[in-house]
Image (tube, rainbow, N blue to C red):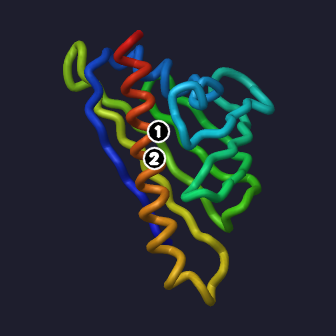
Amino acid sequence: MPDVKIDLEIRAPIDRVWETVVDIERYQDSMDTVRSVRIVEQNDECRRRAAWSVLLKGSILEWEEEEHLDRETHTVVFKQLRGDLEHFDGHWTLEAIGLEQTKVVFEVVFEIGIPMLAEMLNPVAQRSLQENCTEMLRGIERTAAIG
């Protein structure tokens, strides 16, 4: 399955970056490709379900995912429950690399789900997801840096 992995160093303390990463309902305020994100169920502070709608190269991609948040290790693991792709799982990992510097790693593994077209579509989808995910990280960087 294709994957996308992006890391970015953000000049902000890890706790501020963490709060920005987990505040997904505000993503659309700072990210052009995010149409909407809505928390549809919050079981506790560590587990929730969210509905996403994003623009991917002019197409709308929608899914619902389950997220596991671990504030202690600064990780978010997500798994698509249903949506437009056959498979869409990944994680966020934050690491303090100084008092005012945080490394953010975002990784997603996906499968379009059209076997006959996978060889042609997967590279295009991978590049598009890479661009979208980079834009998401830049939005997090702008928000976290502001405070």
Residue, disc 2: 133
Residue 16 found in image quarter: top left
Amino acid carrying label 1: it is Met
Amino acid carrying label 2: it is Cys
Left/right of residue 107 with respect to residue 85 in the rendered view = left
Q: CA distance from mark 2 to mark 1?
A: 5 Å
Left/right of residue 112 with respect to residue 48 in the rendered view = left
Q: Secondary structure at mark 2?
A: helix
Q: Position of residue 94 (x, y in %)?
A: 37, 31
Left/right of residue 45 with respect to residue 11 in the rendered view = right
Q: Position of residue 101 (x, y in %)?
A: 24, 21
Left/right of residue 37 with respect to residue 147 in the rendered view = right
Please name the residue shown 40% across and 15% down the image.
Answer: 15
The reply to whether callout 2 and callout 1 are in contact (CB within 8 Å) is yes
Q: Is residue 98 above or below residue 4?
A: above
Most foreground residue, 140 or 108? 140
Please name the residue shown 23% across and 13% down the image.
Answer: 99
Please name the residue shown 46% across and 65% down the image.
Answer: 126
Residue, disc 1: 136
State the quadrant of the C terminus. top left
Query: Residue 9 has which mark?
Result: none
Please name the residue shown 42% across and 52% down the image.
Answer: 131
